[in-house]
Structures are given as C-alpha cells and as structure tokens.
Image: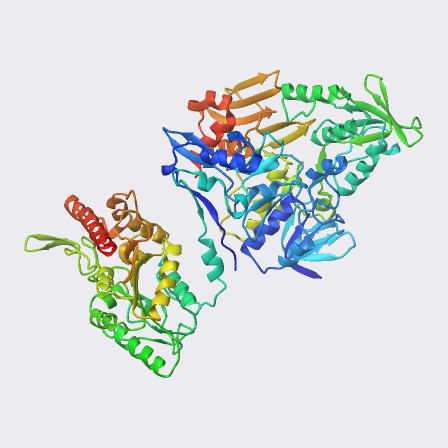
Amino acid sequence: MGRGYNTIAFDAAKCDGCGDCMTACATAKTGTEDKTRSRIQIVGSGDDGFELALCRQCGDPKCVTVCPAAALTKNAESGVIEWDAAKCVDCLLCTIGCAYAGIALDSGTGHVAKCDTCDGAPACVPACPHDALTYITTSRIYNEVGGWEDLFTPGLAGCQGCNTELLMRHTLRRVGPDTVLATPPGCVPGMGSVGFNGTTGTKVPVFHPLLTNTAAMLAGIKRQYKRVGREVNALAIAGDGGASDVGFQSLSGAAERNEQILFMVVDNEGYMNTGMQRSSCTPYGAWTSTTPIGRGSGGMPAQGKTQDAKNLPLIMVNHRCEYVATASTAYMEDFYDKLGKAIEASKRGFAYLHVYSPCTTGWRFPTDQNMEVARKAVETNFVTLWEYTPNEGLRLTRPVDDPMPVTEYLKAMGRFRHLSPDQISHIQGKVVENLAFVKQMIHRSSV
Amino acid sequence: MEHTKYLVVGSSHAALEAVTAIRMHDADGSLTLLTRDAHLPYSPTVLPYVVSGRSAADDVFLRDETFFATNRVEFKRGSALKALHAARNAAELADGSEIAYEKLLLATGAAPAIPPIPGIDQVSYHVLRTLDDATKLHAAIKQSKQAVVLGAGLVGMHAAENLVKAGANVTIVEMAKQLTDGYFDPVAAQMIEKAFTDHGARILTGSRVVKLAPSAAFGTPGTTLTLENGTTLEADLLLVATGVKPNMDYLDDGGSGVEHDRGILVSDTMQTSVANVWAAGDCAQAKGFFTEAKVMNAILPDATEQGRIAGMAMAGDPGLKYYPGGVPLNTYHFFGRHAISVGSSKLPEGGEVLTRFDEASGRYLKAIFKDGRLLGIFGVNEFFDGGVMCQLILRRVDLSAVKERFMANPLAVGRELMSQLWR
C-alpha cells in the first residue's frame, strides 16, 4: 500500500503578498531575512493575484531523474525530496528539470536549495498572518487507517464517483471487528454490504432490516448482546430516506430511549438507489424523478421539489442524544474526529452521525467532482458542519467566515440547472435562515 | 534461450527512466537490464566531478541492487549487446549467448569519437565516458605537469579546469572558432575563455592537430602534437574530448534492419523502424523541437524524457504522450561561475535577439524571440529557472506584453508566468 504525505497548501485568495512567509523561511533556513533566499517564493502582484513557487514534493519528481549525482531522493516515509549536500555537484540540472521553480540556486551558498518542510513543522505556515498557508496533515488518516483491517470485501458495486464506498470502508475500519451492522434498503446494501450469492459483503455480522424498523432491530440486538455480557458496537448505516421518512419513527424511538447504538445516515438527499425519487431530505428546487421538470398541470409548471428539506440532524439534537454531528467526506479529519466521538458516545447512549454524500448519478455531476461538490456545499453554507453533546451544546466545527454565493454550489450539478432567479433567491434565503437557526441553537446552548 | 518480456540495454538515465515507466504500468512482466559496464548505474554527466575528486567514484550510483530486487529487474552487468537479430526478436551478447525479448529498448548511449589524426594509434591518451575512464583520469591529473585537451566541449572544459586546479600547464585545442561551440554564444564563450586564461590555461581555438607522435620529454609516455600551423606542443597527459558517437555497431553486426543515420532513427514514441524495438537517449536520433528533422540531442534531460516515453510505449501505457521534440538544455560551472542555456541558439528569419551584459558583475543574459515567443535563453552568472523557461518554450507562450520586464528579471517574471499558466 502506498503512503499519503503531508503537504503545504496555499490559498491564493487569502494572500496579500506581505512576504512574512519568505522572511520566516529565510530566517529558519539561512539565518538571514533575505527574502530572495527563501525557499518559498510568493510571486505576482496585487492586480493579478499572488501565486506560489515552492517545491511540490512531486510523486514523480523530475529533479530526481535528471540529477547525475544521485543527490536528490524522494523519502518514501515523509514524501519530502531530500537534497544531499555531500553528493551534489552544483551542476544545476535539477533547476532545468523542475517546471515549478521548486529548486533554485541560493545565491548565499552557491548551492541549490529547496523546501524540506522543516521536518514536518514548516516555519512559513505559522508566519502567515492571513491563513493563506496551511500544513495539511490529513494523510495521517490514510496512513494510519490504511493499516487497519478493511471489513468490507473487495468489489463493492457503487456508481462511479460515489463517495459512499469510501465512507463505508473508513467507518468500519474505525469501528472495528466487534461490530454488528444494520444496513436497511438503500445504496449501502445496494453497493454490496449484504452481499451476493449467499455470502455477505462484510467481515462482520450484517443484517438487512426493513426501512421502517432499522433502529428498533439494532437496539434489540444490542440489548441481547448486553444481556449475554458481550461488548459489541451496534452500527447502522442508513440512507436519508430510511432515516427521515418511514424509518423515522423507529429512529426517534431509539433516540428517545437512549439506546446504545451508533446511527449513521448517508444523506444523498433522495431515494437514489431505486431511481432517484425525492425524500424529505431533498432540497427545495431539486430535480428528482418524482419532482420533475416540465409543463406541469393546472397552469403550474413543474420546477423540481416545491418544499424545503427536513433538517434531520437538528431534529435529532432535540432528542438530546449523547452525540449528534454532521460531517462531510470533503473534510475527512473532521469526519474522523466526529466518528471517534460518536463511537465513544454510543457506549453510553444514542449517537447520531449525519454525513452529506453527493450523488454523482442522481444529482447529475461529473464522476470526478464528488469531493468538489461536497466541499462547495460546506463553503457556501448550504450545509453546516457541527456537533452537539448535551453538556457542551452545539458548536460549528468548520465555520465558514466568508461563504461563497450558493450559486457556486447549485451550478456544480445538473439537478438545479432549471432554477429560476426566484427559486435561487429562495434557496439563498434558506441558507441564511438555516445558518441563523443553527447559530441560535449555539447561542442557546452557551447561556 | 533466456526469455524476457522487456529487455533494456544500457543502464544510464534513459534506461533507468524506461524501467520506472514500465514498472508504473506493468508491475509483473519480466524485465532484464543489460549493461556492458561492470558497475552499478551511473551518469556520464557526473564523471568530470569524479575526475576532480568532488564525487567519490563509489558514491555516484543512481540505483543499487535493492532497487532492482524490489522492482523485480534482472540486472546483468558486464554484458554487452553484440548483435541484434530483430527478425527473430533476439539479442546476441558478447559471450555468444542470446536473450529472446518481446520488447527491446536500445539505450546504449555513446562513446568518445576519436578523430582520425595520423599517429593517434601510436600514443596513449585519455577519454572520459565511463567511470573507469574517470578513475584513471583522476589519478593521472595529479601527476600531470603539462596537459593538452583536444576539444572544448563541456567534457573537455570540465577536465581542463580540473587539470588547471591540479596545477598543470594546460592547453586546450579546439577546431571551432570559439570554446563551447554549440552550447554557448561567442560572448559567453569569451567570458569562459577569459576565466580559463586568467587561471593560466592556454586556449588555441581555430586550431587543428595534424600529427601525434610519442614523446619522451617527460620520462613518462608523452605525446608531441603538431598543429596545422606547424606549432608543436608537448603533453604528459592528452585528453581526447572531441565529441561522442552513438554506440550502435550491434545493429549492423546482426543485420537488424534498424534504420540509423547519425543515431538510431526513432518516431515520436521512440520506436525504431523495426517492430518491438525502441531507442532512447544519446544513441537515438529523434525529432527536434525547433525542426521536424531528426537531430542528435545528447543531453541528460532529454535522455530521461525519451526513456520515459519509450518505457510507456513498450508497456502500452495509455497515458503516453508524444515526444514534443528535443530542446537543447545545458548548464555549466566554471571557476565558481555558472552558465545556463535553454533552447535554440539559432536566430531564425524574423527573429529578435535581446541581450544584457554587465561587465562589472560578469552577468550576461541573452534571449531569442520570434513572434513574441521565446526560442532560447542563455545566461552567465544570471540565474533563472531553466525548467520554467523550457516550459515557456514548449508551450509557445506569447511574451510580447512582458518582454522588457522578462529581460530585466527572467527569474521573477518566469515564475509569475508559471503560476498563471500551469497551476
């Protein structure tokens, strides 16, 4: 298995060209404040925006291949391309190989110099006063979790570009083998959790309850295990239809009884597995096969769903569960943090995790855009990432200071293509209203 | 007969890149790397530094046995290709044995071209192409009092500088009118020449050696050189560095049918004229970027590029992109200064040359444009990102609007363009 690596990320929109990062780098690496000797170089201008010349620590590094002296090597552990001063012959061929100006002549030493990420604590990142530089360490999840046992069998059959397989494999790896899994009708069993030809798709006990009784059955199984003195994690992975529509009664009941289970909802905002019918989680204006676009009837053209989505996770907060949170696969560190807390909480009582899951097929967007759509949902505040516990109340885990207009999200997919300006302003209004509602709840929990 | 899916002949940059490219796409197909050299893979480009002592001869290897084991590559050293029997997909080795291949890469590099000077077979001389050559020359320069270097290309100049630093009286004899012809223009060559003469070297450009004879002037086997104008030179060390020629005798010995001219002729995917045979690196003659004609572009960065393309083509990698054509790329260090040349030094019709020269600092910059597009850029003591410049050339970026700023500061403006053009 390959390794993931940490990386220095640059958000050009936040950079004002102050150069503090360069000063910090020059100070750390050369002991001077000479910005020309910094290994991170901010280029450009206030008019055209600022950009970055910095070693990309390429996976297939050209500087390494053109070095005649074997002085450059990619460290397989850290991912950093390391320069060996003892082997370097100062030929500068690496600077001809690199198309990103990531390795250049340091006039102070006469040798080439490049970013080495300061051994995992880059000096430039904390020096940035505008958070334009961040050190992304999400790779540790991949590296750590990649070593844990994958409790799903190979060959799950999802739609191309779907993030649910990622979610399933990550979640079960994290929850571990002492688990009983419930997967009611929906995309998760559709992808193969309940298996094919008489074998299950999981390496843990799995069952396929009805849409209506998932939480009830799982609660019973958990109680039986407790009765016989065996500690197991009771986990449901359900769709939004199975949770918010007909499954809601048993979900609400289990939450009210504070059953010790972890109920995870993969919210793709409709019954996508059966042909993309609307659910109570489908947002206003969205096309589905049961909220079509067309001439309509009675003089009323059909323009997608005419009702707003139910905010299921907020309803779960009102059950005063042990733990309630929303998450997104575009923010895996946040998701992992919440998954860990949810597992802990489920040992005490009811834990609810609501994961937003863009649907390539049903929402109509290209298969390589899943994470991008998920990210835009958060960055426009179309969905908000937060967590709730009875003691701490509600708090935003990834507040968005400067949200993009909701149109950035809407235009990323086909199901909103038909929207009229009125519908768009309705949705933008709902985004503001929903956020205000969440903030009110935050306020209530802080007093 | 031994059988292998991929047979790669040669063990330097082109060959090693091909191995990497093959393994990227085909993790399991049997792969054999064959080299006539007795050592682990190394770069000819590092050899001048072995001569100077800057690099230790045992610390220049590009790969170790672990690499070959990990990548399941059968690495056979000291095993030369003698003849290629392309009609039956077989390579005949020097020891008479044969290897059957499914796909063959010829990355056999080049060897010193020895000029047909009368008497050259009577005298002892050095060349510099293999690690053993370098080790021998490294030992010899310490003893030398009076050395002659034939040829003022980068190999000759590097060695001459080493000889100067080791304390020898050095004479460089070059047929062309200037040093480093084909790499650097007359202004840059003049700067290089001055650095050498300042350090006591003697430069004889536009000179031809017409006769070589053994000399006993030094007590050790030396050489007397006679120049065209009648001058004679005495040398206790003679280095012949008058260029290289591709290693491809094996093509004719086996009647392979592989077409060749100055090098092995290859297509834009490095395929030769014969099925299942590819060629890359210093032995290949491929399309130039500035001309459709096939050219020799025997430089390290191009060898890696060609090797990668050949490897991808051999493995059937669908990510294969056609070779854009060779762009000359060279860097050169001399007496603490550096020179970089990227692209074509020829001024085409309708082209424009811009130069900047500051005598005090010794900074020299020259760029050639046509229709606002950069064709070549050359600097002495003026650092710019060669890789960025190369992309500006390959992408034919229109620099009309920024030409003046670009000439004033190619480093900053190049990076600015880069950040806008290839995020």
Q: Nearer the viewer, residue A80 or B196?
A: A80
Q: Is residue A356 visible?
A: no
Along the line of sight, the residue nearer the viewer: B222 or A321:
A321
Q: Is residue A10 left or right of residue B15?
A: left
**Residue reaching furthest to the front:** A447
The colour scheme applied to this rendered structure is rainbow
Position of A327 with respect to A118 (left or right) is left
Left or right of B330: which side holds B241? Answer: right
Residue with the most extreme left position:
A298
Does residue B129 appear in the picture of this structure? yes
Identify which residue, B214 or A114, lies in the foreground. A114
Note whether B203 is above or below B422 in the view shown. above
Q: Is residue B167 above or below residue A406?
A: above
Q: In the rendered view, tell whether residue B246 sits above or below residue A394.
A: above
Q: Is residue A339 above or below residue B159?
A: below
**Of residues B387 and B179, the one drawn nearer to the viewer in this rendering:** B387
Residue A389: percent from left, percent from top: 29, 61
Q: Is residue A274 left or right of residue B303?
A: left
What is the x, y in percent for residue A405?
Answer: 25, 43
Q: Residue at x 40, y 37 (%)?
A: A129
- For the C terminus of chain A, give its image quadrant: bottom left
Q: Estimate the x, y position of residue A127 in percent, counting from the top left.
A: 45, 38
Q: Position of residue B58 (x, y in %)?
A: 74, 46
